[in-house]
Amino acid sequence: MQKKNYKESWVLRVINIKSEREIALMKEAGHLNYLTHEEIKKHLHPGVTTKELDTIAHDFIVKNGGTPSCLGYEGFPASTCISVNDEVVHGIPKNRKLKNGDIVSIDFTVRKNGYESDAARTYIIGNVDENVKNLVKDTEQALYEGIKLIKPGIHLGDISNAIETYAHNHDLSVVEELVGHGIGASMHEDPDVPNFGKKNTGIILKEGMVLAIEPMLNLGGKEVCMLEDNWTIVTEDESPSAHFEHTVAVTKDGYEILTGE
Ligand code: MF3
Ligand code: CO
Ligand code: CO
């Protein structure tokens, strides 16, 4: 008898396939996520605190019939993750004022209709060096390089590889410890969506899968560590980091971005 790794054999991985109706409901959640990002954008200027931005997002989501589902998720104490400069992700909003020369990543989930949506953007406050400008621009483009391949029949590794290749071609490093994910009634579902990998590997995409794709790219090295607050992930070499994320459905012949306009 062939011996099998016990753990491997009993862990059942299920990728939920969403019906058209479910995707329509997720799109409503995604649209509120988009509108909340647009609302926050109006208040981004030197002097605003990350806590103030969090409150704006929280109140906007609630007012529009959604739930800020980051709040309380595994004990996370806010409605948004706000990560400044060398903070990669999961920064906790606090009494820190944004200032000229900062970059700020804002990432949050919105729950509506029983479904989650997840999206992140990085903004530049005032003036930054050319290489930091490029970091932000290229991280956003890396997200779209991954998204534009999406259709039934491609391998998940094709997305990962496109993001990694774009990042490396633009002299950016890829954070490996944190990955994108499936999303639906739960914030984090299978499969993992790494931002690095090989073409023609991994699962094959099918219509009705919904993925949160989220490159986290650094200007310096790829290594990251966690601060003592047990949430904030920062780059080890303190170089700036950018993060963009969309929730994307696999459609019959392509994709639909659910957290877009
Ligand atoms: N939005 C994050 C993601 O992209 C998850 C945040 S979890 C929280 O997966 F607890 F920090 F809110
Ligand atoms: Co997110
Ligand atoms: Co996510």
Image: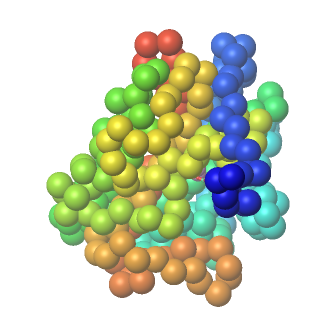
Foreground of the two, 217 or 112: 217
Percent x, y for residue 64?
76, 33
Q: Residue furthest front?
A: 1
In the displayed structure image, the side of residue 66 where residue 94 appears, left or right? left
Give the quarter of the image for residue 25: top right
In the displayed structure image, the side of residue 112 where residue 41 appears, left or right? left
For the question of whether residue 150 can be seen, the reply is yes
In the displayed structure image, the side of residue 12 where residue 138 appears, left or right? left
Q: How many marks?
A: 0
Percent x, y for residue 215?
42, 53
- Compared to residue 199, the image places residue 223 above or below, namely below
For the question of whether residue 58 can be seen, the reply is no
Q: What residue is at 82 percent from the left and 60 percent from the top?
A: 72
Q: What residue is at 57 percent from the left and 54 percent from the top?
A: 107
Q: What residue is at 55 percent from the left and 42 percent from the top?
A: 212
- Compared to residue 24, the image places residue 148 above or below, namely below
Q: Residue furthest bottom?
A: 228
Percent x, y for residue 91?
59, 69
In the displayed structure image, the side of residue 227 where residue 86 appears, left or right? left
Foreground of the two, 212 or 151: 151
Percent x, y for residue 181?
58, 46
- Compared to residue 135, the image places residue 64 above or below, namely above
State the scheme by which the image is colored: rainbow
Q: What residue is at 43 percent from the left and 23 percent from the top?
A: 153
Foreground of the two, 41 or 2: 2
- Compared to residue 236, the image places residue 49 above or below, namely above
